[in-house]
Image (cartoon, helix red, strand yellow):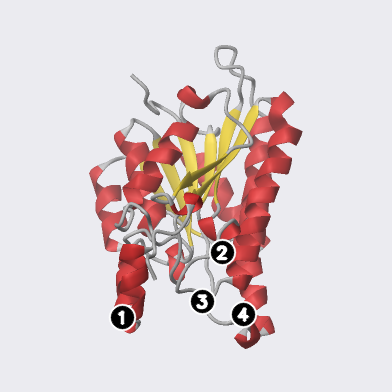
Amino acid sequence: MIDLKSKKIIVTGGARGIGLAIVTVIIEAGGHVAIIDLLPQPHPDCQALIEKTENCHYYTGDITKLESLESAFAKCVSALGGSIDAIVTNAGIGTDKPFLEHTLEDFNRVVSVNQNGTFFPTQLAVKQLLSQPLNEVTKTRGSIVMIASQAASNKCPGHFLTAYGGTKGFVKSFCLQLSHELAAEGIRVNSISPGTPTTGADFGNSYIETDLNLELAKRRPDVNYYFQEAPPMKRLGQPRDIAGGAFYLLSDAATYVTGVDLRIDGGMSAGSGLSR
């Protein structure tokens, strides 16, 4: 049976939404998780999970500030027993507005979280993995899974994602380049592009049903049409749909998989299902 038994994994932005779904699947599969999130206290659903198991740890950290990130990362490694098997760089934000309405502050914030907040947690994880021995059975040292977005490759009907899509394009390209650089070291690097978009922790990752997407639909009723009709499968994806992909890429079933962008988007990459 494929599982994540005893694997030690750090997840950024793991307190809610897709990140929490990934954390939950890791725990269910026998893994150990340390979460880095900006929230001072875990989301109630995350807190409930922490209280159920000894294998989930939570640390507040700002991935856009190196000192805060390094401190939280060190706490994670310590809580996981001094070594790690993987990191999932899930934290991300975005703006949904026309190109000409973007301000410098909008742009810098999205770049800081989505690009810097992927690059530097990954750098810390690679340093840690390189300090650890190669697994002689799998011939790997560990796995990196980055959360990109459909917005890096496709237009998202009903949304304006120039800045957000650009930063997720960076994540896809970064993943590809780094996978080649680290392959000989036994470190696998892959990304997941969920169907896309909204605001907050899961911005850009709708057509996935999260609390933030549902709240967006209340504010912008027109979005409901795109949520239901744009994916060819005619439904919103669930956070666990994305978590299933992460489970595979983190597991030993994927020991020969690197440099891949796994699209989990209800068919959006094949074309929109819109009739109008």
Residue at the image point whose x is 76% and y is 35% from the top = 181
User: In the rendered view, would you say 120 is above or below 258?
Assistant: below
Front in this rendered view, residue 222 or 3: 222
- The CA span between labels 4 and 3 is 10 Å
Task: Name the quarter where the N terminus is drawn.
Answer: top left
Q: Amino acid at mark 2?
A: Asp
- The CA span between labels 2 and 1 is 33 Å
Q: Pointer 1: what residue? A: 221
Q: Nearer the viewer, mark 3 or mark 1?
A: 1
Q: Earlier in the sequence, mark 2 or mark 4?
A: 2
- The CA span between labels 2 and 4 is 18 Å
Q: Is residue 104 visible?
A: yes
- The CA span between labels 3 and 1 is 15 Å
- The CA span between labels 4 and 1 is 24 Å
**Label of residue 62 in the image:** 2
Count every numbered label the image shows and give the total. 4
Q: Give the structural element (helix, strand or loop) at label 1.
A: loop
Residue at the extreme top of the image, as rendered: 137
User: In the rendered view, would you say 244 is above or below 14?
Assistant: above
Decide: few, some or many residues near mark 3? Use Cα within 10 Å; few <14, some 14-19, many ≥20: some
Q: Quadrant of residue 98?
A: bottom right
Q: Earlier in the sequence, mark 4 or mark 1?
A: 4
Q: Amino acid at mark 4?
A: Asp
**Label of residue 96 in the image:** 3
Q: Give the structural element (helix, strand or loop) at label 4.
A: helix
**Label of residue 106 in the image:** 4
Residue at the image point whose x is 51% and y is 26% from the top = 254
